[in-house]
Image: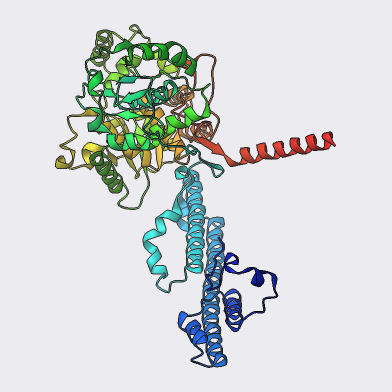
Amino acid sequence: MLTTTAHYRRRATEFNDEEKLGDHAPSALEREEALFRDIECNHSFHVFPMTKYSFSRKGIMDKWVLWAERCWVNASWGVNSMRKYVESSLFTFLLLMLVVSAVLKFSLSIHGGGKFAESDVTGQKIAGRENEILFVHNFKNNILSMAQKAFSNPEPSSSVASLKPKMKQFQISEIWMKPNSDSFYKCIDPKRKRIDAGYESNGYLLVHANGGLNQMRTGICDMVAVAKIMNATLVLPSVDHKSFWTDPSDFKDIFDWKHFIDVLKCDVKIVENLPPEFSSVKPFVKAPVSWSKASYYRHEILPLLKKHKVIKFTHSDSRLSNNALVPSIQKLRCRANYEALRYTPEIEELGNILVERLRDDGEPYIALHLRYEKDMLAFTGCNHNLTANETNELREMRYRVKHWKEKEIDSTERRLQGGCPMSPREAALFLKAMDYPTSMKIYIVAGEIYGENGIEGLRQEYPNVFSHSTLATASELEPFIKYQNRLAALDYIVALDSDVFFYTYDGNMAKAVQGHRRFEGFKATINPDRLNFVRLIDSFDDGMISWEEFASEVKRLHRNRRGAPYLRKAGHVPRLEESFYANPFPGCVCDRQQQQKKKQLLDVRREQKTIASQ
């Protein structure tokens, strides 16, 4: 950005005609201002106002004042040069330390590391040498980072001692790094005008958001888009109280409703309640068709809205297609989801406190969506590692829930098809095979783990396992403990902010969180290949492959399953498509490189068209 200097000179419009046309010789004041501009441009130094005042008043001789000014500039330049010389010398010294240390460590690894290495077994020798090489690599990163810090920071207080608390951030392994997404950015904010007072709505839309927290969340976003498509006024949605958790919380208990209305005020008119003149109107009740296109709402639902003026949707989940929608509607869904639907201040505050406690020692943490819960196991029919009594209990529950269509399920076959959530033990062995340290912190994003062994299969390998129940105090948790949707909101915040999010089943929360993490810069998110992993772990348990073979294959399978950008996959059947909320690219995330290629292609076509027309 160019910096402009204000001068006390008349604008061109202030001159009379004779001044504009005649030769205008520079005055003494203009010559002085030109001299000041020369000093400021050549020395990057601001002339003191007192000096300018002295010139203008002629109270001090011009030559003496200018001489003093230049002396001050030269002195400042000398000090800056000396500082840069010292910083450069320090940088060179640290690089020299790096080279010497690397040579010493490499020499030790070549000679086996002394008597201890000679007496060790072959596997331990290899592990020892790998650790030595890793130490050199980490030491190199530390030295380089310290050198860059010292070289770039001009403050004398930035000493090596002050960098010690930050050393851990330079030892981060690839397992914690997010995938490369440098050319991608959010693109959901077109120029919009606020809906004016003369806005005429086609009617009022009442919505019952069904399901758990994340199912309701995505359903509400779809209904915002539907209200836009039909030019309807959306009444603040009601939420489900009859799902598995029977949570009595209302919309205002979970979400910041005023923020929700304010963020979307330029897109959709949203009101807290029906106006008095419509309170006695009986709404037309309708369950929209799942995965419908915009044309369905324009041609079939809009005429009903215009006729009845008030319409109520009994379901909101998956009522809008993932694809085949205009860009403005897709962007609106993302504005609703990632900007408007913010949790209440109380939930947000406690969620952030939990994140701070997980990071109190500066170490990264994993959020593990371990969906080995009673309702999910009953729904999927999975009973791996469960007792006969537990299996029967799940089967009875499945038959009690009328809207679960599948009743007789072969658990073994479903697991081999990759259709079951990982057990706690399977999740532990997966993380261990991926080289996640057993000392790391794991936050469980789930309810109570089902089975007599519960979470122990995970805790045996990773003892530092936490949840909202163990991180928060009893008094902090008291306002939320009876409300599952509010507890799920706490988990959502911790999962969204985690260094790595690892989900063991493709449920609604897994989709919602991974999509939000993609939108926030493609944070590391592990999508396990359950189909192949089950076969691997069964082979390992049967003694058919060694641990080394098992771990190597797990790494190979998941090398490219860490949340890197890719275009959302469309399908022939909407039900089998990739969810828009699991991957908002394309729609709400854009690729600079792709846009540049399109621009270049358009430029070439324009040039060819111009040549052809000549």
Question: What residue is shown at x 44% (from left), y 37% (from top)?
Answer: 193
> Which image quarter is the N terminus in?
bottom right
Q: On the image, which quarter does residue 340 sit in?
A: top left
602 left or right of 583 in image: right
Q: Nearer the viewer, residue 56 or 464?
A: 56
Color encoding of the figure: rainbow
- The front one of 113 and 340 is 340
* In the foreground, 117 or 551: 551
Give whichever of 133, 293 is nearer the camera.
Answer: 293
Q: Is residue 9 above or below residue 530?
A: below
Q: How many marks?
A: 0
Give the percent coordinates (x, y) of residue 349.
Answer: 26, 44
In the picture as drawn, the residue positioned furthest to the top comes out as 408
Residue 613 in which image quadrant? top right
Q: Position of residue 78 (x, y in %)?
A: 55, 82
As drawn, 21 above or below 463: below
x and y percent of residue 14 in the render? 57, 67
Residue drawn at the location 59% of the way across and 41% of the way down: 592
What is the x, y in percent for residue 167? 41, 59
Image-based side of 460 in relation to 601, left or right:
left
State the quadrant of the C terminus.
top right
> Is residue 320 left or right of 360 when viewed as pictured?
right
Q: Is residue 244 visible?
A: no
Whether residue 488 can be seen here: yes
Q: From the viewer's perspective, is 270 left or right of 292? A: left
